[in-house]
Image: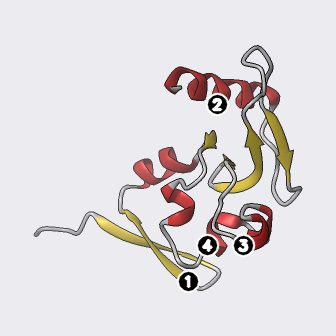
Amino acid sequence: MNESKIGTINVDSIAYVRPRSENVADAAVDGTYLLPPFDEILLGYRDRTAILGGVELERVVPGRNGIFRPIILHNGRICGTWRRPAKPADGPEFTFFGNESEPSRSALERAWDVVRQRG
């Protein structure tokens, strides 16, 4: 029998599509990521309630003008925004929303290393 590789997960009574394998889904959301503006994880859904974790969209898209800020994704939820430093020698600026647990400093540093390596 050929089983589907697509499953769903319910968040606040809304079904979201995801890979059926628990390992794939867990690996995709665990950890800390500094994502660019216009990343698909936020833009890919009309209803962004699950990924925003109670944060008002206004904090990510000020003025609702279509310009998205870069986001901090921690364990599958947006917990803040970030900005590149004005000087390359400086570190990024983080703004946390207080809606979810914040990532550790070391997790943020590892995420920043990935961003710098990718350019």
| Spatial separation of the CA atoms under disc 3 and disc 4 | 14 Å
Q: Secondary structure at mark 2?
A: helix
- Mark 4: give few (<14), some (14-19) or many (20+) Cα within 10 Å: some
Residue under numbered circle 3: 64
Check the image and report above or below for 12 versus 88.
Answer: below
Q: Report if residue 54 is visible in the image.
A: no
Q: Secondary structure at mark 3?
A: helix
Question: Going from the N terminus, do you reach mark 2 or mark 4 first?
Answer: 4
Residue drawn at the location 60% of the way across and 44% of the way down = 35
At label 1, the amino acid type is Ile
Task: Name the front one of labels 1 and 3.
Answer: 3
Residue under numbered circle 1: 14
Q: Nearer the viewer, residue 2 or 79?
A: 79
In contact (CB < 8 Å): disc 2 and disc 4 = no
- When asked about the image quadrant of residue 17, the answer is bottom left
* In the image, farthest residue toward the top: 89
* Numbered tag placed on residue 111 in the rendering: 2
Looking at the rendered image, the quarter that the N terminus falls into is bottom left
* In the image, farthest residue toward the right: 98
Question: Going from the N terminus, do you reach mark 1 or mark 4 first?
Answer: 1
Check the image and report above or below for 101 versus 41.
Answer: above
